[in-house]
């Protein structure tokens, strides 16, 4: 007999209430926020950064998989079947036939893309899980202000038809890089089932740009940083009043976590 508890598993994501629209999910998770606070602390360096990054992205991948991935009914025998006839888990699992494409946005997004690749290979049939790469960097003016994004190249392994496309990129500041990466994905053959961005920290400016350019894309983040906002905006429900800001004059997030691409790679160029 199948236990009714596992017939239709309900998952409710704990998230921050806001007015940015139903595609934006700011996870409300004190464990993740605690780990993230360590990532941003000036004393945190390698090898701690990679471990903390993996744990934070574990929370994000869990939220996305639980909410957006297809499920199927399964009957999976356990080791107890040797001594108890019919011992098996009977209930829902993630559909192992789900097609997934991860896009590593170099350089900060490369490591979390590989972390997701490992996780999804544990959940889904390996031939249906692919990792692609996009190489980008900020273009700045003489004052250090970001004026655009330079695309150094990309490596896509095929189409995205009926795939769930995941773009993990830790810092969502202005939204310019991720918007360009999404555009590249949409130019590939086929129609993806979902396109999902996964970030540690995002800003109001990021949300505005990405949702305007790509209203069909899901955004998941562990934290919304709007540290340069007006007192009125900080006291209000996110997205409900003007005066929100989370990036400084050179487009770095405040309070943010600094240049994570530099910290992750121990390369300060």
Image (tube, rainbow, N blue to C red):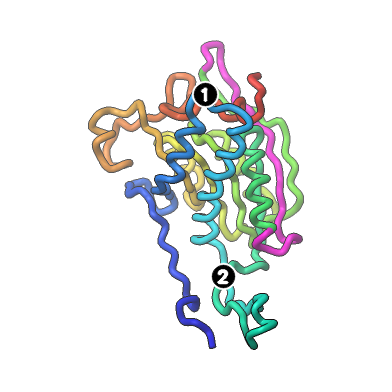
Looking at the rendered structure, the secondary structure element under dot 2 is strand
Q: On the rendered structure, is 237 left or right of 129? A: left
Reply above or below: 78 against 131. below
Question: Any magenta on residue 193?
Answer: no
Reply above or below: 2 against 55. below
Instruction: Give residue 228's mark.
Output: none
* Percent position of residue 132, x then y: 71, 46
Q: Which residue is mark 1?
A: 43
* Percent position of residue 44, x then y: 54, 27
The segment highlighted magenta reads: 122-144
Q: Residue furthest front?
A: 83
For image coordinates 56% across by 15% down, the residue present is: 141
**Of circles 1 and 2, which is in front?**
1
Q: On the rendered structure, is 138 left or right of 129? A: left
User: Observer-nearest residue: 254 or 39?
Assistant: 39
User: Observer-nearest residue: 214 or 25?
Assistant: 25
Q: Which residue is mark 2?
A: 71
Q: Residue furthest top?
A: 142
For image coordinates 62% across by 69% down, the residue present is: 95
Question: Any magenta on residue 143?
Answer: yes
Mark 2: few/some/many CA within 10 Å (<14, 14-19, 20+): some
Q: Quadrant of residue 147?
A: top right
């Amino acid at each position: 007999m199948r236990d009714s508890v596992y017939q239709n598993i309900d998952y409710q994501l704990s998230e921050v209430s806001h007015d940015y629209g139903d595609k934006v999910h700011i996870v409300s998770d004190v464990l993740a926020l605690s780990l993230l606070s360590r990532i941003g602390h000036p004393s945190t360096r390698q090898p701690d950064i990679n471990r903390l990054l993996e744990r934070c992205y574990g929370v994000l991948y869990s939220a996305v998989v639980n909410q957006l991935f297809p499920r199927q009914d399964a009957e999976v025998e356990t080791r107890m079947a040797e001594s108890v006839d019919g011992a098996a888990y009977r209930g829902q699992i993630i559909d192992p036939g789900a097609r997934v494409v991860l896009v590593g946005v170099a350089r900060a997004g490369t490591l979390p893309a590989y972390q997701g690749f490992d996780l999804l290979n544990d959940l889904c049939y390996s031939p249906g899980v692919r990792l692609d790469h996009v190489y980008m960097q900020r273009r700045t003016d003489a004052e250090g202000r970001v004026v655009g994004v330079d695309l150094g190249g990309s490596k896509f392994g095929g189409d995205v038809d009926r795939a769930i496309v995941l773009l993990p990129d830790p810092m969502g500041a202005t939204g310019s890089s991720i918007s360009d990466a999404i555009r590249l994905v949409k130019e590939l053959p086929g129609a993806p089932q979902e396109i999902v961005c996964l970030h540690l920290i995002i800003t109001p400016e990021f949300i505005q740009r990405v949702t305007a350019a790509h209203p069909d894309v899901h955004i998941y983040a562990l934290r919304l940083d709007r540290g340069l906002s007006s007192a009125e905006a900080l006291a209000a429900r996110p997205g409900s009043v003007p005066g929100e800001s989370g990036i400084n004059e050179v487009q770095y997030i405040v309070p943010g976590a600094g240049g994570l691409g530099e910290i992750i790679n121990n390369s300060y160029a």
